[in-house]
Amino acid sequence: MTKTINGIQVPQRADFVGSFLRPADLNDSNRDEYVAQLVEKQKELGYTLITDGEFNRTFWHLDFFWGFGGVTHEPGGDIAFNGETARLDRVYLTGKLTAQPHPFIEAYKKLKKYEDDKHIAKLTIPAPAQLFQQLNLPKNFLGTRAIYPNINDLINDIAAVYQGFIRQFYAVGGRYLQLDDCSWGAILGTSNSISSQRYKELGSNLDAVKEQLLTVNNRAIEGRPADLVVATHICRGNYHSTWFNSGAYDSVADWAFARENVDVLYLEYDDERSGGFEPLAKVSPNKHVVLGLITSKRPELEDEDKVIARIHEAAKYIPLERLSLSPQCGFASCAIGNKLTVEQQWTKLQLVERISKKVWG
């Protein structure tokens, strides 16, 4: 899959997920200046897609949900990661979901000013399935069902508010939208994963849940303009260099790889927790895959030759021309960020750029 945005071909061979380490003194008064410096650095390193580093939000996902009507939040949404507890807000419904002017649009308009004939402003937001999962957490389940007794009505309303947001995004010139999605990553591996167990405790059949995740994601983006690129990043959790789940993609490939109607898949493949490349054979022929072979969780640099060998290993299952390279996740999915320095972050991106030129020219 290749498309052209403002005369620029996408996807690019060297890419990144979206978030970057926040400056220690980041606040409302200096945010725009720090974003300007961040974008300049991305351009300097040779990247075509640019982001604001998610400097305008505390959490990669929750802040976005607050922009919908019928949603509120409060402390108490902590989640256990591997060796650390992620301090998150609890997000829940106070009424039916409604679309309204979304604050992320104003932030995106500021980023879009940095577009030129060589650069495209990319917006990252949580996937519709992520909101579906959030509203079906054990703490939220009964409250959600009180407002949406029929789960199909919930799916339809999530899709509707996302479609409303996409219209707003497109109207201000947005053409590259990335849906970050831990809902697939949370149920990877065995049926004994924490999220899989949660769904079972709520009386849900896991295959039925996969159909629901697929349906809400596809319904939210159906009918989108032909020149709008929609990507998704499937994540296993990224908080202060820790992770939420492990497991190969085999158990979700028939849904997310084969049937989700996105243009680009960003996939974590930085260590053994990700499994092998065999599930890539399930990726539908209209999709491009960005291989997240460079970890954003640790400062140590990967061996270039080994990364190149892994790219060619992946190419046994999907043609090399449909592959790109990136870090496995963002560098700061929440304000706390991962355990590496800003300079180490940039060194990682230099490595991605260098390897991509060796592989694809």
Image (cartoon, grey):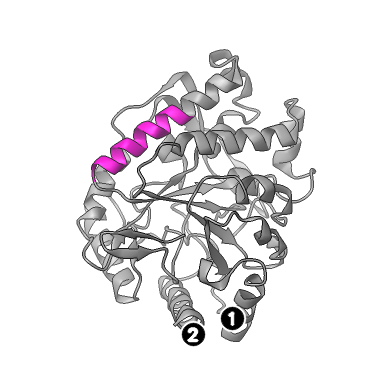
- Contact (Cβ within 8 Å) of mark 1 with mark 2: yes
On screen, residue 26 versus residue 285, left or right, reads: left
Specify start and end residues of the magenta stretch as a single range.
Answer: 159-172
Q: Provide the secondary structure element on which disc 1 rests.
A: helix
Question: Where is residue 20 drawn, in percent x and y?
Answer: 41, 61
Query: What main secondary structure does the magenta stretch of the protein show?
Result: helix
Regarding residue 323, the answer to whether it shows in the image is: no
Q: Is residue 145 magenta?
A: no
Q: Which residue is mark 2?
A: 358
On screen, residue 337 versus residue 145, left or right, reads: left
Is residue 3 positioned above or below 307 on the image?
above
Residue at image x 35%, y 61%?
23
Sequence-wise, the earlier of marks 1 and 2 is 1
Of 86 and 162, the residue lying toward us: 162
- Quarter occupied by the C terminus: bottom left
Q: Which residue is mark 1?
A: 308
Question: Where is residue 95 drawn, in percent x and y?
Answer: 45, 17
Residue at image x 66%, y 67%?
317
- Residue 11 falls in which quadrant of the image? bottom left
Question: Where is residue 99 drawn, in percent x and y?
Answer: 36, 26
- Residue 104 falls in which quadrant of the image? top left
On screen, residue 210 versus residue 190, left or right, reads: left
Of 333 and 123, the residue lying toward us: 123
Residue at image x 60%, y 16%?
150
Question: What whole-number distance in Å separates the C-alpha atoms at marks 1 and 2?
Answer: 8 Å
For disc 2, the neighbor class at 10 Å (few under 14, some 14 to 19, many from 20) is: few
On screen, residue 125 versus residue 187, left or right, reads: left
Q: Which label number is shown at residue 12?
A: none
- For the residue marked with disc 2, what is the amino acid? Lys
Q: Is residue 165 magenta?
A: yes
Regarding residue 277, the answer to whether it shows in the image is: yes
Give the number of callouts.
Answer: 2
